[in-house]
Image (cartoon, coloured by chain):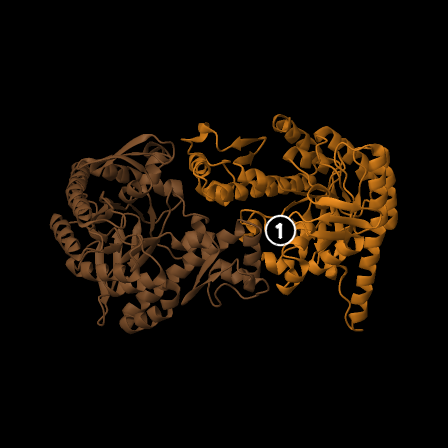
Chain colours: A orange, B brown
Amino acid sequence: MTFFEIINTDSHSAARRGVLRTAHGVVQTPAFMPVGTAGAVKGITPEYLAASGAEIILANTYHLMLRPGVDVVEALGGLHRLMAWERPILTDSGGYQVFSLGELTRIDDEGVEFASHVDGARVRLNAEIATEIQYRLGSDIIMCFDECTPLPADTARLQRAADRTIEWAKRCKAVVGSRKSEVGDRQTADYRPPATDYPLLFGIIQGGTDLELRRRCAERIVEIGFDGYAIGGLSVGEGHEEMVKTVRYTTPLLPRDRPRYLMGVGMPADLLAAVLAGVDMFDCVLPTRNGRNAFAFVPGGSLRLRNSTHIHSTEPIEPGCDCYCCRHFTRGAIRHFFNCDEMLGPILLSIHNLRFYQRLMAEIRFHIEAGDFGIWAIQELAKYVEIDR
Amino acid sequence: MTFFEIINTDSHSAARRGVLRTAHGVVQTPAFMPVGTAGAVKGITPEYLAASGAEIILANTYHLMLRPGVDVVEALGGLHRLMAWERPILTDSGGYQVFSLGELTRIDDEGVEFASHVDGARVRLNAEIATEIQYRLGSDIIMCFDECTPLPADTARLQRAADRTIEWAKRCKAVVGSRKSEVGDRQTADYRPPATDYPLLFGIIQGGTDLELRRRCAERIVEIGFDGYAIGGLSVGEGHEEMVKTVRYTTPLLPRDRPRYLMGVGMPADLLAAVLAGVDMFDCVLPTRNGRNAFAFVPGGSLRLRNSTHIHSTEPIEPGCDCYCCRHFTRGAIRHFFNCDEMLGPILLSIHNLRFYQRLMAEIRFHIEAGDFGIWAIQELAKYVEIDR
């Protein structure tokens, strides 16, 4: 039994229904990972997070290494203990944040040096440090340190970023290799841990929306060989069509028997389109960030709860939704909470939106198993045309 | 069977252990009411609020009449429905807020006119309007409209406020009287509702820390006759000793067989001292407000969670506490959440502090029943000397 098993495939698309085993438990795929940037999924307790159906969450190495720092996380018993989250955690490598949040002071083939957005301190990050930190956080899935390019970026820049991402991936794998042999050294003759007792390592494909670059990067990353493969550098403003085109081109270049993760994506329509293209995992801040801004996801669209049309509404956000918010609160009450800046507004919409995303993923998995995913997903996508334009 | 029953008294103090019956259920007294100012107890869901052990909460007429407005509350199914809180709610009359928040434009014996702190609109409030609004909100316990004086206030001012409070109390009672007869008119010969099918009306004693004024006001308010009696105008900066002195002087002037409510109080030591003096009910924003500001209540003291001494602490806020926060999170993690402005920090400390207050009340009730309250309370009070000074 391997750590990733495909239990169903869709005959009309590249969609797959899988099971991913990690050190902290099993994840049914396609899966959506809520984002717990600094060790907390914003606005809700882990109790509501678990109730949403989330089986795995993402945490950000960049944020955690700056605050509270990896020493503190270790002293507090590791990231799972700090977060009070006993299920799997995937950590990103910090690459994306270094290039988007930190003020870069130096970047070369060795790694990067940047000014912390917290206190301006000079911090260094490279393949070895990023991998080591993720180990020490207690991550279940470690991401390779990569260079993420902003939009727009010329081919030379994309090329250089992809090349560095490939070289850094080799170095990340080397760190994991030496860590694994340490684990091996500690084992007794009677006991060998299952494959998932140490974290999985995922490689990242870069290359922007340049398909030729994506192909070359994918080939090299697959050649190095990882437990799973992520498509990075998307959802940075390229739009739904370009994103889908790039994903559809890239997924067939990845091994069939390994999980595929589309980083930072996305809106419901993005998820549907990417699952059609064969993606297994997603992460995105939208359910919580939009929830805090009075934006509620509903089937085929959205509600803006600050809108005065909701003042007298006794309807729940989404009739039929089984989340705590929809079972107990009217749209009118939630509008009132936002209007008064009561924390309960953001809390309730975060609860609903996270549950909405998990219900969407459960439906996706159901239809792949039922064998009608291709047809169903196209119909669903049509409903979302409005919201994504 | 009346709506208020005293089931135990303490032989060494004036403390009483009672049961208060309202339209939305029973409240064990002495009771602490968390404050849901604008229809939400700040920072937590009603699910955690119920889990804290709270049996009754307070909501503010002033805030609700301005936002969302009583028409909207009615359209949304009443205050209990808006808040998703099925247990009793006590509403204040708006008096305290009018005098402390609104920019007063006119005050006379008839009532007040003030500028809304939300949009500056001129709003009028008097005995009839305040009582009617509380009815329409669906309150279980209505408070009389009173004039609350700030500190310092000269005797003339205190006197005038107490006189107005007495006159307004008569008018509030008249409104309730006509409402009750309406209910009576609708009854069939076969059915009479129990006393608690309509809200209870509590009178308020004013008079600052002037004991002679308190006595005269109490006599007049008791003469008018109410379901319960509140001591208002305290916890406005007079300090623990003055507050306790005033309470100890006032409670013996109130009927033994009616609930006594000390408004806006207080710190744990204040509650212990007031229960010793025979008070049955309290409300205060401290558990939630302090929680949002990284201040945690613990037995005999407090913790400031932003303090760097907690960085590496793997202890819960209060070892042995059964709240969600203490069962799952370390002090170090909570400090980190506050340090990063994660909403989870305020959420967790609000959960803990509310549970702390309810555990304190449960202990108080336990010791009154056990017959050793007087001795126990004095010992407990000694522990809190530090925190209140």
Q: Establish if B379 lies above or below A30.
A: below
Residue type at the position of mark 1: Ala
Q: Classify mark 1: helix, strand or loop.
A: loop
Q: Residue at x 45, y 27 (%)?
A: A309
Q: Position of residue A265 (x, y in %)?
A: 68, 39
The quadrant where residue B101 appears? top left
The quadrant where residue B314 appears? bottom right
Q: Is residue A44 visible?
A: yes
Q: Position of residue A22 (x, y in %)?
A: 71, 56
Question: Is residue B318 found left or right of A280 in the rendered image?
Answer: left
The quadrant where residue A74 appears? bottom right
Q: Residues within 10 Å of mark 1 (few under 14, many from 20)?
A: many
Question: Is residue A279 found left or right of A330 in the rendered image?
Answer: right
Q: Residue at x 83, y 62 (%)?
A: A178
Residue placed under numbered mark 1 in the picture: A38
Pointer 1 chain: A
